[in-house]
Amino acid sequence: MSETPSVVVIGAAAIDEWYAVSNLPEPDGGAFASEVTSAFGGVGANVSVALDRLDRDVTLITRVGDDEYGRRAREYLAETGVDASHLRVGNDPSTRSVVLSAPDGERAIVTTGESLRELRLTPADREAIAAADVVFLPGYTPDAVSRDVLDLIESLRSGDREKEAVDGDPPALVFDLSGPVEELLGRGTEPETVHGLLHAADLFVAGDVAAAAYFGGPAAAVDRIAAAQRTRGAEGEGWPRAVLTHGADGMTVVADGNARRFDAFEVDVVDATGAGDAFVAGLIDQWVAPLGNDAERASSGRLADGVRFSGALAAINCTERFAQRGLPSREAVERFLAARE
């Protein structure tokens, strides 16, 4: 590529404690772990590393604890091309996750640790965001940070560039709802802030579970987003392009008031951990980072190409264990797609 835009990612860099279980337990049920190991994860780190593998210039804003988990997370990041100069170390326990991975690749995740909850933006963080081409944040971002990002972008869009001491266009905003509302309360982005982000975002992504918790169900999410796009489009304001993901059942893209369903690629799934993060990274790469307001990329044909690329990125990642081990290069994604034409 002739130009590599800057992407700022906000989110966790964590250690995943990975359990290969016989089954995902039902309530009051159990499971047996035939293997226990650990790997690098966290939504922020997953999206950052995926973009780095695609040769994107990416900066991660995150916070880890001054403990063994935090040390290992910093070591993993140092082995990537991700700019970790905005990483802070605090006295809280590092954010980390227990991942239960079943033989069919499906998983359940439990997260603990206070380090990310205490993240707050510094003046240097704000400068990096204001100067970026794209900023991405998941629903797990602390509400104070999400509100700060929202206020900053709205200030930049209102023409207050001199106040922020930056030149050029405001960054495009990508928001991934990530989790159900009840899971985010007290640790992530609050519903009122989510509402503001949905209206400010250039791209909004949500899985079925998160969409059901916020909108009342996947179908309701499609109807509400499409109706808002049609209304706001008529007023000349526009509304974010949205993607609702359905795991192995594919995804629904809502753009310009219309919904379109796409199938997922069929692969031998080893581990689905991080598939959603890989998919989001692909959408950022294809739809937002290169030319966010380019008419060609807004076309229906380009929309489909972007979904296929992102779906391929996620599918390839599912063929390896852990959230990041299978993240492919751009060339690997293109080979995957060429073999399926």
Image: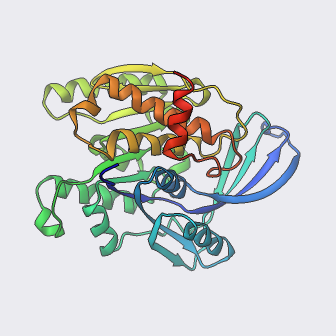
Residue 281 visible in the current orientation: yes
The residue depicted at 18 percent of the width and 58 percent of the height is 155
Taking the image as shown, residue 190 lies to the left or right of residue 123, namely: right
On the question of residue 192 being in view, the answer is: no
How many marks the image carries: the answer is 0
Residue at x 50%, y 70% (from the top left corner):
63
Nearest the viewer among 164 and 288 is 288
Q: Position of residue 173 (x, y in %)?
A: 31, 49
Q: Can you give x and y, in whole percent of width and height, for residue 115 in the image?
A: 55, 69
Q: Residue at x 61, y 28 (%)?
A: 248
Percent of width and height locating residue 207: 52, 35
Judge from the rendering whether residue 161 lies leftward or rightward of residue 223; answer left or right: left
Taking depth in this image into account, of 228 and 247 the one nearest to the observer is 247
In the displayed structure, does residue 166 sit left or right of residue 219? Answer: left
In the picture, measured across the screen, residue 251 lies left or right of residue 224, that is right
Residue 103, quarter of the rendered image? top right
Compare residues 249 and 212 and report the one nearer the observer. Answer: 249
How far across and down, in percent of the image, does residue 159 sit? 11, 56
Q: How is the image coloured?
A: rainbow
Placement of 71 over or under 38, stated as above or below: below
Q: Tell me where residue 252 sits by quadrant.
A: top left
At 32% from the left edge and 54% from the top edge, which residue is drawn?
5
Q: Is residue 163 above or below residue 102?
A: below
Res 317 → quadrant:
top right
